[in-house]
Amino acid sequence: MSTSVLLSLCSVPDRETGLRLAQQLVEQRLAACVSLSAPVTSIYRWQGKLETAEELQMLIKTTTKQYPAMEAAIRASHPYELPEIIAVPVESGLDDYLNWVEQCTTIE
């Protein structure tokens, strides 16, 4: 059973940024829920250099319909020059939860 629900990932440099972005996305109905992880260590290559950073991961529950606006909102407010914004389709899940995500992201 395929759904229109997406799980989007976005790393942020600190809790304050994550809370601000999460609140914005939920208030604007661009996400039903955003969970912030404990700090994680990210290792990546940026501008030719190997970098290591402590970040938090945002787990954003949204829909394919709201994804473009969600991405635009993150890009407009994110402190990184190139923020990680990845979306993975949710193939299946608890029907009541998936319906809740759809309801919470529907703008009336």
Image (cartoon, rainbow, N blue to C red):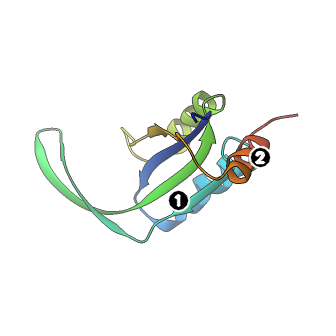
**Which residue does the image show at 79% across and 37% down from the upper left?**
106
Question: According to the image, label 1 marks what residue?
Answer: 18
The residue located at (58%, 28%) in the rendering is 68
Q: Residue furthest front?
A: 1
Q: Nearer the viewer, residue 14 or 97?
A: 97
Please identify the residue farthest to the right as the structure is shown: 108
Judge from the rendering whether residue 54 lies leftward or rightward of residue 94; answer left or right: left
Question: Which residue type carries mark 1?
Answer: Gly
Q: Position of residue 93 (x, y in %)?
A: 59, 49
Looking at marks 2 and 1 on the same chain, the residue that comes earlier in the sequence is marked by 1
Question: Residue 34 shows which numbered tag?
Answer: none
Where 92 sits versus 41, above or below? Answer: above
Q: Residue at x 62, y 33 (%)?
A: 4
Between circles 2 and 1, the one closer to the viewer is 2
Going 74% across and 45% down the picture, which residue do you hit?
A: 99
Disc on res. 104: 2
